[in-house]
Image (cartoon, helix red, strand yellow):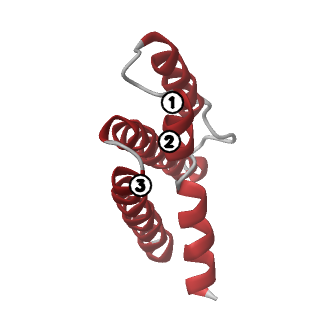
């Protein structure tokens, strides 16, 4: 369990680092509103990853399936993108998906 806890911390930290780099790059290449949308999406991705890890933690304590509550995060992100004109939907979704490259990088570094 200690290894799993360290892995969770490293995954969230890697996601934050990749997200910070992506937001900075977006701010340089595009504009600040686009970078803000990427930031909102990246924070939603970190929240999704945290909720998923919390749900997986409960598997051994009597629960036999993973909770679906984390699926609300991308749904709320899409709804917010369609509701608020300041939030650009495509950059926000790309920011949300930044947790995936962080997972791949973590797998490469662990091997």
Name the disc covering residue 59, or none.
Answer: none
Determine the secondary structure under disc 1. Answer: helix
Near mark 2 (Cα within 10 A), the count class, few <14, some 14-19 or many ≥20, is many
Instruction: Looking at this view, name the residue that lies furthest to the top.
Output: 83
Give the camera-side residue of 62 and 43.
43
In this view, 34 is above or below 98: above
Q: Which residue is mark 3?
A: 29
Determine the secondary structure under disc 2. Answer: helix
Which residue appears at 57% of the width and 34% of the height?
Answer: 90
| 32 relative to 103 in the view: left or right | left
Tell me where residue 104 sits by quadrant: bottom right
Distance of mark 2 from mark 1, alpha carbons? 6 Å
| 42 relative to 24 in the view: left or right | right
Q: In the rendering, at what x and y percent does residue 78 appear?
A: 55, 23
Instruction: Looking at this view, name the residue that lies furthest to the right.
Output: 65
Distance of mark 1 from mark 3, alpha carbons? 27 Å
Near mark 1 (Cα within 10 A), the count class, few <14, some 14-19 or many ≥20, is some
| 40 relative to 73 in the view: left or right | left
Name the disc covering residue 48, or none.
Answer: 2
| 45 relative to 97 in the view: left or right | left
Which residue appears at 56% of the width and 85% of the height?
Answer: 109
Do the CB atoms of the residues marked 2 and 1 lie less than 8 Å apart?
yes
Q: In the rendering, at what x and y percent does residue 17 appear?
A: 37, 66
């Amino acid at each position: 369990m200690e290894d799993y806890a360290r892995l969770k911390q490293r995954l969230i930290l890697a996601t934050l680092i990749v997200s910070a780099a992506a937001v900075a790059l977006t701010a340089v290449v595009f504009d600040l509103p686009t970078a803000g949308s990427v930031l909102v999406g990246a924070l939603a991705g970190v929240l999704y990853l945290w909720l998923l890890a919390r749900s997986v933690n409960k598997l051994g304590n009597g629960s036999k399936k993973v909770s679906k509550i984390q699926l609300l995060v991308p749904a709320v992100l899409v709804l917010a993108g369609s509701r608020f004109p300041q939030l650009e939907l495509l950059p926000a979704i790309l920011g949300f998906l930044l947790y995936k490259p962080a997972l791949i990088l973590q797998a490469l570094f662990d091997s």
